[in-house]
Image (cartoon, rainbow, N blue to C red):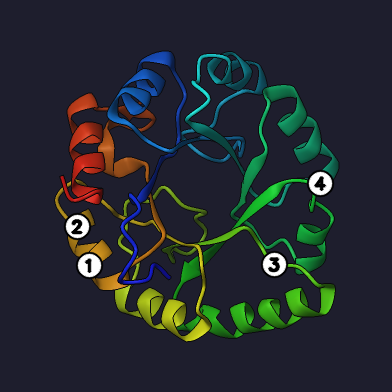
Amino acid sequence: MQDGSERRAMWVKVCGIRDEASLRCAVDAGVDAVGFNFWPGSRRSVSVKAAAALRALLPASVEPVGLFVNQPADWIRDVAARVGIATIQLHGDEPPEFLAGLADLRVIRVYRAAASELPRLEQERDAWKALGMRPWACLFDAAVPGEFGGTGQTAPWDLVSEWSSAQNESRTILAGGLTPENVAAAIRQVRPWGVDVASGVESAPGVKDPAKVRAFVAAARGG
């Protein structure tokens, strides 16, 4: 959790990038990271070839993140190498041992924020300790049955804040239903290390709205 005395800028990621226009508007707005969704079940999925072409346009200041859902570790490594990605976001039911097998990559572990998910989270934390590892960051999204993110539903901020405080998580990323209008309030309540947005800055699924992206980044950073 972000310490109250810190003055660093909020880490901001725009996910579901599929085209050059969306990529450029995110970069121009000053984001820290962009997400490429490699799960074919998503409306925002992108091919490996297209992601590699977009990755080549990124400045060094913007981190590319690959999003995966219950996909084989060897395939994830292959995609990461072909696209040029060092950070991956796991949205599925991958066990701790799976994460340990990807220790050469920075792993953002995603949880669907709901009281029913807390036992699983606690079990995973114990397993991480036993394996001598932990994810690079933990991301909390809304819990929507059968979905793996990008729903536009708001995550329960109170629950995420409570868990983050109790676990002293150094990198908590908040997602789920964030928009330019509510992100500042979400940050005040949860005090995350970073925020992640997709549908909240779109004019259509996968199509980013430049004005919304700029407004989101400004609001997230108190501008």
Which image quadrant is residue 174 in?
Answer: bottom left
Dot in front, 4 or 2: 2
Q: Residue at x 39, y 56 (%)?
A: 175
Could you tell which of marks 2 and 3 lies nearer the N-terminus?
3
Could you tell which of marks 1 and 3 lies nearer the N-terminus?
3
The three-letter code of the residue at mark 2 reads Ala
Mark 4 vs mark 2, CA separation in Å: 36 Å
* Residue at the spot of label 2: 184
* Residue at the spot of label 4: 73
Mark 2 vs mark 1, CA separation in Å: 6 Å
> Residue 52: image x %, image y %?
63, 18
Would you say the residues marked 2 and 1 are in contact, meaning their CB atoms lie under 8 Å apart?
Answer: yes
Above or below, 176 relative to 63: below
User: Residue 188 shows which numbered tag?
Assistant: 1
Which of 141/6 is in front?
6
Say which element carries label 1.
helix
For the N terminus, the quadrant is: bottom left
User: Residue 44 shows which numbered tag?
Assistant: none
Q: Residue at x 80, y 31 (%)?
A: 78
